[in-house]
Structure formats: structure tokens, C-alpha cells
Amino acid sequence: MLGASTFLLGLRPTTKVFFRSNISLIPSRTLASCTGRPQSVAKLINPSVLVNRSAALQQPISKRFFFQTSTLKSRWKPIFNEETTNRYVRLNRFQQYQQQRNAGNSLGSMTVLGLSLMAGIYFVSPYLFEHVPPFTYFKDHPKNLVYALLGINLAVFGLWQSPKCWRFLQKYMLLQKDRMASKFSIIGSAFSHQEFWHLGMNMLALWSFGVSLSTMLGASNFFSLYMTSAIAGSLFSLWYPKLARLAIAGPSLGASGALFGVLGCFSYLFPHAKILLFVFPVPGGAWVAFLASVAWNAAGCALRWGSFDYAAHLGGSMMGVLYGWYISKAVEKQRQQRLQSTGRWF
């Protein structure tokens, strides 16, 4: 069971700048393709005409994309085959529900709340899984805890497919950097996926590593690891735009912060375990693969490439390694105590 696992960690995407306020910055390529004019000719047209045509073009697109449910093909085809611009339009569909900035949810208060939740989860989890249903069920069936987490993520993904739920999801299941509508989003965003490929990759990684690790650590320890890694990823995601002095940072969502924590803990405890990237074995084992992922995420934060929340990946990774170190020390301490107690009999 430790010999082979599937290394297929999903990514936590962070949507780039594509809000209503700068929608006029996008249409130069779109207008050229729709009107048949080259891009250089389109730029010579009166800007007010471009803005009007842009609004006219985007109105039917939004209706067809999000509210018209004519056929199953038109609804699911864009998930697997679409241009980058269209992808950001889909990811930012919740922007129509933008609310006023909530001054009470400052970065400092979110940080204090996150650290308090991490400490509370660590100390309360043993009691929950010992005395409180339905957590007591998972104590004897730790694998089913992983399946329960899979089910929660699938349920939230299903809610994203209904426009009636977007207002609720945007408030509680989306980690927004510039307007924190709810403190609960530091946890809710870790169970939220909008795209099928994102959900599929993350849930495959959770199943691959989670089933083995939950059996070895127990339900209480695995739950604590998963939740604290998710919160740590959200906190790193909130602090990164401030430390990097980014003027605007898009919202993010996804379970990859928690999953990188699971990978970090697994690779620390079993550094030579053989894992697969899709179907290809990774040379050097789990620890080498984990270090490679850390280097990739660090480079992503420094160079700011792609559209993924690399800071959340790093936050979860650090929490996972810390948890793995703590568990290894606890196991070694128990081993020494057993040896000492056994030695007294001889």
C-alpha cells in the first residue's frame, strides 16, 4: 500500500483581473475576430463605438453561457475545450454579485481567526472523534472520512452549476482578496470547485493519498491535518498579494492547499515511497516529488506565471511537513517508552 500512490495533485486557480471595471481592456482581439477587421483597424475606430459593440457582444454570450440550458453538449463542452479568455469569463461569473467591502473582515482579523481555528481543530478533534456523532463513526472507519470529504466537494461543485446559488457561494465558498464578504470563506473555499477538471484532479489526489494516510494516522489526526492545511493555504493566499505588493489579486478556490498538506505529510513520513505522475514513476520517491512541487510553487510566486494560487500550495505544503515532523516525533517517543517499559521486565 505504501509502495505505489498516484501523484496527481490538482491546482488551486486564482482568477486573473477580469472584472467589470476593466472589461473595455479585453475587446481588441474579440472585436477583431467578430467583425472581421484586423486588430490594427479595430483600434482606429471610435472608442465609444468599441465600448458599445463590446457591451452588445457580451450580453448574449453571458445569457447563452450561464442561463440557457438548451442541450447537454452546449453546457459541458466548454469545460474541456475553450479559450483562455472564455475560461476567465466563466470563472468570474460570480462578479455580478459583488458587494461592498466589509471593513470588519480585515486581513488581521482573518489571520487571527485562521490561527484560532487551526489551534481549536487540533485540540478539539480527538474529543470529536471519541464522543460526538457522526465523527465517532469515522474513528473506526477512517477511509470513509476521505469519501465524506469527496462527497462534500462534489456537492459544492453541483451547487456552482445552479445560478440561484451563486450569491451564497460567492460569499462563503470563494476566497476574495480585496473584499472579504465572510470569514467562513477561509474554510469554505477549500471545498469549492467551479470546473470539472479542477475537481477531478483534486479529488483523484485526495483519494490516492488520503485513503492510505487516514488509515495510518487515524481519522482524528487526518482530519486535523486536512483542515489545518486548508486554513494555512487560505492564509498564505491572503497574505501573498500584500507581501508581493500586488495592486489587484483575483479570488481563488480549491482544495489543493489541503492536498499539498496531505502530500507533504505523506512524503515526510514515507520519503522513499514510490509514486506515479499519471502513469509515470517519479524517480527518487515521494520526498523528491514533494521538493519538486515546492520549487515549482515557489517559482510561481516569484515569477507570477500562470493563473494558480501558488501561495496557497506553499502554505499547505509547509503545514503538511510540520505535521509530518510532529507525528514522527510522537511515534518515536512512544517507541522509546515501550522499549523502556519492556526493558524493566528483563
Image (tube, rainbow, N blue to C red):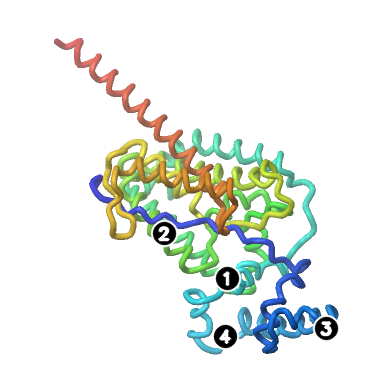
Question: Does 127 sit above or below residue 346?
Answer: below
Label 3: which residue? 49
Q: Which mark sits nearer the N-terminus, 1 or 4? A: 4
Give the residue type that dot 4 points to.
Thr
138 or 209, nearer to the observer: 209
Task: Return the residue nearer the eye: 163 or 64.
Answer: 64
Residue 84's tag is 1
Q: Residue 107: percent from the left, percent from the top?
A: 71, 43
Q: Are marks 4 and 3 in contact (CB under 8 Å)?
A: no
| In contact (CB < 8 Å): disc 1 and disc 3 | no
- Element type at marker 2? helix
Q: Earlier in the sequence, mark 4 or mark 3?
A: 3
Relative to 224, does residue 89 appear above or below in the rendering? below
Residue at (50% x, 47% y) in the render: 297
Marks 1, 4: nearer the viewer: 1
Q: Amino acid at mark 1?
A: Thr
The disc, 2 or 4, on the residue closer to the chain's N-terminal end is 4
Q: Secondary structure at mark 3?
A: helix
